[in-house]
Image (cartoon, grey):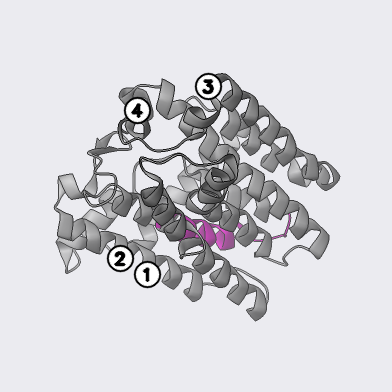
Amino acid sequence: MKFTDWSTYIQQRTETALQAVLPAADLVPDRLHEAMRYAVLGGGKRVRALLVHASGGLTHARPEQLDRAACAVELIHAYSLVHDDMPCMDDDKLRRGKPTVHVEYDEATALLVGDALQTLAFQVLAESPVSATAAGQLEAIRLLAVAAGSHGMAGGQAMDIAATGHEMTREELELMHLRKTGALIRAAILIGGQAGEGVNDERRRRLDHYAKRIGLLYQVVDDILDAGADTATLGKTAGKDAAHDKPTYVSLLGLTDARRFTEELLAEARAPLAPLGERGVRLAELADFIAHRAF
């Protein structure tokens, strides 16, 4: 199956799985459940779900196991977007080409949507076997928790807020984005590698190296797109980093060197995949997709 066909298939599987795990819109409290579905369904590239399925190809995991893991990661991602868009954070009005949750509903509902999506993610991961072993199941839950917490996504967002209006070194910027963006991407890859029979230590090290480079690559490309693409193309407000005086790879390195850095990260991400043979092809294709995506 060609990459475009495979990615479309996984995106559709993930959408169907998310529709099933989210509460029905007419179930009390119906406004909250309607807003949860609004926040999650019908948008996004599902890159994290694709990474779960691609790394799960190494583990003999059943597609249904990977669907549940992918849902858990996508729910955490959606919750983070809802909260990041709120007036107390980035105060964005547009996400995935439609009004943000606090605009479409209200701030209190948006806050509760994020809370409910985060807890639902762990419920989904806990209720269905993702791994063949109890230890593997617990490790998948731990990976997601760490990625979402103060040592991961939440911590990265706190660092981002603190950095507004200040210069950062390249090392500081990398640490911030490895947490804010990279932590959940890394979790998606390692949870996929934990699924089914799991991977041995050597393959896990290869996946981890790939995951860290891919997480950073995703953010560098995001910075480039934010600086150069328009709002209609992105489906979210363009140029907001510069408007908010936030440090980015473009502001630190310049556009030309930031683009050069993406090619370095892409090569570093692909390097550990070679010994995986055919089983690593989807991961390599995803690296190319992330590096060269237009929006």
Please give left or right for residue 199 compared with residue 240 in the image.
right
Closer to the camera, 284 or 169? 169
Residue 250 higher or lower than 162, as above or below: above
Instruction: Bin the neighbour count of mark 2 within 10 Å (Cα to Cα): few under 14, some 14-19, many 20 and up.
Output: some
Q: Circle 2 sits on which residue?
A: 115
- At 60% across and 54% down in the image, what residue appears? 186
| Mark 4 lies on residue | 239
Residue under circle 3?
A: 255
Q: Please identify the quarter of the rendering in which residue 61 is found.
A: bottom right
Q: Secondary structure at mark 4?
A: loop
- Secondary structure found at label 3: helix
Separation of marks 3 and 2 at Cα, in angstroms? 37 Å
Q: What amino acid is found at the position of numbered circle 3 in the picture? A: Leu
The type of residue carrying mark 2 is Asp
**Residue nearer the viewer, 58 or 118:** 118
Q: Residue at x 64, y 37 (%)?
A: 287
